[in-house]
Image (tube, rainbow, N blue to C red):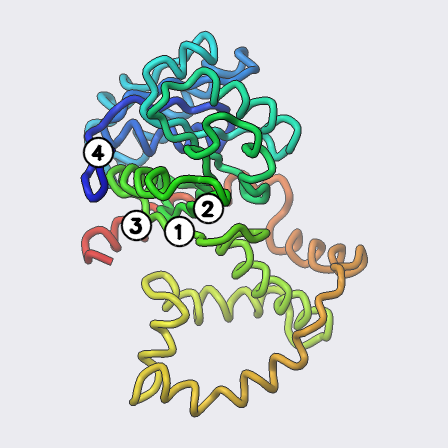
């Protein structure tokens, strides 16, 4: 694939038909790609296909896509890994987070996929160098880590191994842009990539504030969802501070840098979340949301995300 070109819809192999694999199938199918869905546990494939169809219909009902039936017709169940990979222009592996499994699976993917095919992994925690080093085609392998669910949250973290070719990264980025995702390139392998490191920093401070008795779990959540989160839904932390001082980012840092340095001194230690702390937080959450209502709340979350994405699409964010 040449640089700076937008690839036409092609064939994608989705390897792993769990929630993330299903979500990737939705992303590619609604963008015109032919999807071959494969999972080693064949018994679950028909149900996975039905769930994909249902979510495509839900997206159409929310005005986030048209042609749900046509998109659904592009999703096919592959009877074998070889069949799934036969004509693949891109592979998205979404198997469980187990290093030995990925090592064995990527060996098969590299052996069976056409020579031009880029192979991405949905892993959220395992660096590509740990399961691609000995592969003849290691230059075409990289992490393509989505945010769940990727058909509603478009960021994809592309993290190459040291031996992944620049062309493979460029091609993966072009594919992700063509299917409506928002690729970001992680230039060096690092545990947690970008998103989970940012999320982890906020989680550590949230746990720290709760443990110190500063605020309830509900009030900490409110501070994010009705405070920081409103801005973060359409701009990131650097743009946020750039707009929050008359002279932009440098002015903001001059005004508040010392404050954040002082706060940071109290944030250097990240003790493990104790069983007692987790239990206390879980009890507070269960008082707000009984365990049996989690599924219904997740559906509510997805509907709200659909509404937010519709707003962002209309306004070009």
Residue at 22 percent across and 51 percent down: it is 313
Q: Residues within 10 Å of mark 3 (few under 14, many from 20)?
A: many
State if disc 4 and disc 1 touch (CB < 8 Å): no
User: Which labelled disc corresponds to residue 309?
Assistant: 3
Q: Residue at x 80, y 55 (%)?
A: 275
- Tell me where residue 283 appears, x and y as whole percent: 71, 55
**Contact check, label 2 and label 4, Cβ < 8 Å:** no
| Marker disc for residue 159 | 2
* Disc 2 and disc 3 in contact, CB within 8 angstroms: no
Q: Which residue is mark 4?
A: 7
Tell whether label 1 touches label 2 (CB within 8 Å). yes
Residue plotted at (53% across, 12% down): 42
Q: Please state which of the two labelled residues, at mark 2 or mark 3, is closer to the viewer.
A: 2
- In terms of secondary structure, where does tag 4 sit? loop
Of callouts 1 and 4, which one flags the residue occurring earlier in the amino acid sequence? 4
Tell which of 293 and 131 is nearer to you.
131
The residues bearing labels 1 and 4 have C-alpha atoms spaced at a distance of 19 Å
Mark 2 → mark 1, Cα distance in angstroms: 6 Å
Which badge, 2 or 3, is on the more N-terminal residue?
2
Mark 2 and mark 3: Cα distance apart in space? 25 Å
Up-down: is 235 above or below 62?
Answer: below
Crowdedness near tag 2: few (<14), some (14–19) or many (≥20) residues, C-alpha within 10 Å: many
Q: CA distance from mark 2 to mark 4?
A: 20 Å
Mark linked to residue 185 = 1
Closer to the camera, 43 or 21?
21
Count of picture labels:
4
Secondary structure beneath dot 1 equals strand
Residue 62 x %, y % = 27, 40
Q: CA distance from mark 4 to mark 3?
A: 24 Å
Disc 2, SS: strand
């Amino acid at each position: 694939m040449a640089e700076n070109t937008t690839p036409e819809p092609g064939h994608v192999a989705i390897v792993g038909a769990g929630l993330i694999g299903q979500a990737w199938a939705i992303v590619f199918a609604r963008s015109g790609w032919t999807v071959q869905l494969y999972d080693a546990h064949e018994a679950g494939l028909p149900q996975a296909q039905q769930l994909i169809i249902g979510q495509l219909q839900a997206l159409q009902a929310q005005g986030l896509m048209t042609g749900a039936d046509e998109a659904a017709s592009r999703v096919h169940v592959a009877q074998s890994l070889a069949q799934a990979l036969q004509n693949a222009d891109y592979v998205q592996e979404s198997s469980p987070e187990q290093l030995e499994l990925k090592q064995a699976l990527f060996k098969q993917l590299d052996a069976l996929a056409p020579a031009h095919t880029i192979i991405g992994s949905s892993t959220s925690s395992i660096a590509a160098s740990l399961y691609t080093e000995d592969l003849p085609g290691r230059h075409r392998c990289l992490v393509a880590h989505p945010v769940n669910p990727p058909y509603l949250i478009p960021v994809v973290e592309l993290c190459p191994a040291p031996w992944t070719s620049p062309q493979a990264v460029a091609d993966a980025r072009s594919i992700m842009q063509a299917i409506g995702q928002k690729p970001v390139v992680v230039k060096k392998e690092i545990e947690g990539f970008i998103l989970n490191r940012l999320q982890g920093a906020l989680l550590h401070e949230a746990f720290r504030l709760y443990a110190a008795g500063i605020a309830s779990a509900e009030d900490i959540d409110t501070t994010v969802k009705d405070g920081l989160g409103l801005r973060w839904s359409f701009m990131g932390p650097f743009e946020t501070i750039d707009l929050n001082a008359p002279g932009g980012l440098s002015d903001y840092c001059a005004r508040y840098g010392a404050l954040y340095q002082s706060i940071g001194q109290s944030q250097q230690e990240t003790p493990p979340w104790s069983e007692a702390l987790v239990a206390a937080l879980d009890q507070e959450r269960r008082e707000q949301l009984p365990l049996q209502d989690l599924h219904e709340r997740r559906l509510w979350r997805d509907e709200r995300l659909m509404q937010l994405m519709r707003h962002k699409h209309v306004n070009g964010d």
